[in-house]
Image: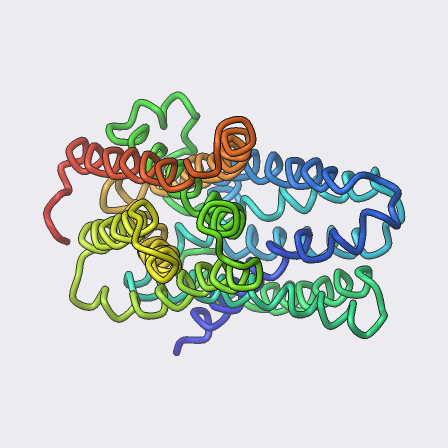
């Protein structure tokens, strides 16, 4: 494996490491901070807002600095933010450090995804997002180790910060490799595009809708699947928690498998395969087929999600051209984070005021909207044929 590609794999693991830390640490944090448990949402929203902003500016930053420098600076910002979390003793300090946390995450996500889409085969995009899943899975284990050892949540954050700092050093030393592969700065002859210009590109709104819906589907399932299985299907909390975790594992393992499927299938076919698999899973949740079918349906939804996100990203240069792909991927990332922010809380309100039984219909509506947006993208860009 080329050295630069190995470094990119490490960077994707690094991207995942902090993503699930707040959720795993918060039960041990909020009492000591003297705030209600619900206040975790405030920190999460600040991180998400920073991520959206930096995603929208990723085109400008990458064209000025290059993917290598953007990645190194962004991971360094994340390392600093996590170190700040580890020494914070009040809620407002966490909110302050959440700003560089979010700003660092968005630009590196968009820059790396675009770089891989331009320079590497589709299988690497699937496997790289599988690496993100490994990082996101490892983060809570590291936090759990710190808590079980009696060292507190601060140590968990500090440990991840040190890992990020180590990767930052590796990225700085690797800058000549990025420059050799066209990632050293001034990438692309075209100037950075404004939001108005991006919105006018045929298919841009459609792909933004597809990303919004994908993350709405994924995050709603992750957040509410366990509650749905317990409240609506009568499954024990222990079993529901285990299978809700299998949804996430299904995404990670599915992306590992999808890397091999891309050798035979195009990005368009991979997205459709994922949508079809997810539809079967949602149908199993909808139909009164018993506990086993509900649990299997949840796993199938996770497996269906696996190829959609990386395949949509990898196809961006094909649909929009290499000179505009960074700008489009930036707004795609922003749209994805907006879907993550808005749609899971919306279902929470629906479940509270109407019924948690609407979980599967809610997922179905989002899936249908995502499918419609993807097909609209293919018509707009005339790239419906297998690549």
Residue at the extreme left: 385
Counting from the top left corner in percent of width and height, residue 41 is at: 67, 38
> In this view of the protein, which residue sits in the foreground, 71 or 272?
272
Q: For the image shown, how many numbered marks are present on the structure?
A: 0
Residue at the extreme bottom: 1
Whether residue 178 appears in this view of the structure is: no
The structure residue drawn at horizontal position 50% and vertical position 29%, both measured from the top left corner, is 350
> In this view of the protein, which residue sits in the foreground, 40 or 188?
40
Counting from the top left corner in percent of width and height, residue 245 is at: 51, 62
Q: Residue 249 occupies which quadrant of the picture? A: bottom left
- Dividing the image into 4 quarters, which one contains the N terminus? bottom left
Image vertical order of residue 218 relative to residue 181, above or below:
above
Counting from the top left corner in percent of width and height, residue 79 is at: 70, 57
The structure residue drawn at horizontal position 73% and vertical position 72%, both measured from the top left corner, is 145
Image vertical order of residue 372 relative to residue 62, above or below:
above
> In this view of the protein, which residue sits in the foreground, 14 or 64?
14
- Dividing the image into 4 quarters, which one contains the C terminus? bottom left
Image vertical order of residue 189 relative to residue 165, above or below:
above
The structure residue drawn at horizontal position 21% and vertical position 54%, both measured from the top left corner, is 273
Counting from the top left corner in percent of width and height, residue 283 is at: 27, 48
Image vertical order of residue 238 relative to residue 34, above or below:
below
The structure residue drawn at horizontal position 42% and vertical position 40%, both measured from the top left corner, is 359
Whether residue 250 appears in this view of the structure is: yes
> Residue 163 vs residue 338: left or right?
right
The colour scheme of the drawn protein is: rainbow
Q: Residue 367 occupies which quadrant of the picture? A: top left
> In this view of the protein, which residue sits in the foreground, 165 or 158?
158
> Residue 201 vs residue 380: left or right?
right
């Amino acid at each position: 494996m080329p050295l630069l590609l190995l470094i990119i794999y490490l960077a994707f693991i690094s991207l995942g490491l902090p993503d699930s830390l707040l959720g795993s640490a918060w039960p041990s944090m909020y009492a000591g901070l003297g705030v209600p448990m619900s206040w975790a949402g405030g920190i999460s929203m600040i991180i998400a807002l920073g991520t959206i902003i930096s995603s929208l500016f990723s085109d400008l930053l990458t064209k000025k600095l290059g993917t290598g420098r953007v990645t190194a600076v962004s991971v360094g910002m994340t390392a600093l933010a996590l170190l700040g979390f580890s020494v914070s003793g009040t809620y407002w300090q966490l909110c302050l450090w959440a700003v560089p946390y979010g700003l660092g995450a968005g630009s590196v996500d968009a820059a790396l995804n675009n770089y891989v889409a331009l320079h590497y085969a589709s299988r690497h995009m699937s496997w790289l997002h599988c690496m993100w899943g490994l990082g996101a899975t490892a983060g809570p284990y590291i936090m759990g180790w710190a808590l079980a050892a009696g060292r507190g949540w601060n140590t968990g954050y500090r440990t991840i910060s040190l890992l990020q700092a180590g990767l930052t050093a590796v990225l700085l030393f690797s800058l000549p490799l990025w420059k050799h592969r066209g990632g050293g700065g001034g990438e692309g002859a075209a100037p950075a595009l404004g939001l108005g210009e991006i919105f006018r590109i045929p298919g841009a709104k459609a792909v933004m809708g597809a990303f919004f819906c994908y993350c709405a589907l994924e995050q709603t399932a992750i957040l509410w699947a366990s509650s749905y299985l317990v409240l609506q299907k009568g499954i024990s909390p222990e079993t529901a928690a285990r299978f809700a975790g299998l949804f996430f594992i299904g995404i990670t393992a599915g992306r590992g498998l999808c890397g091999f499927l891309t050798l035979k299938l195009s990005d368009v076919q991979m997205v459709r395969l994922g949508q079809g698999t997810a539809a079967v899973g949602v149908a199993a949740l909808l139909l009164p087929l018993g506990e086993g079918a509900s649990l299997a349906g949840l796993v199938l939804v996770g497996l269906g999600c696996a190829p959609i996100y990386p395949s949509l990203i990898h196809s961006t240069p094909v649909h929009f051209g290499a000179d505009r792909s960074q700008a489009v991927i930036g707004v795609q990332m922003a749209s994805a984070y907006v879907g993550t922010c808005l749609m899971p809380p919306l279902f929470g309100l629906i479940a509270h005021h109407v019924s948690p039984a609407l979980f599967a219909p809610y997922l179905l509506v989002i899936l249908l909207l995502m499918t419609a947006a993807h097909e609209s993208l293919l018509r707009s860009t005339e790239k419906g044929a297998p690549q």
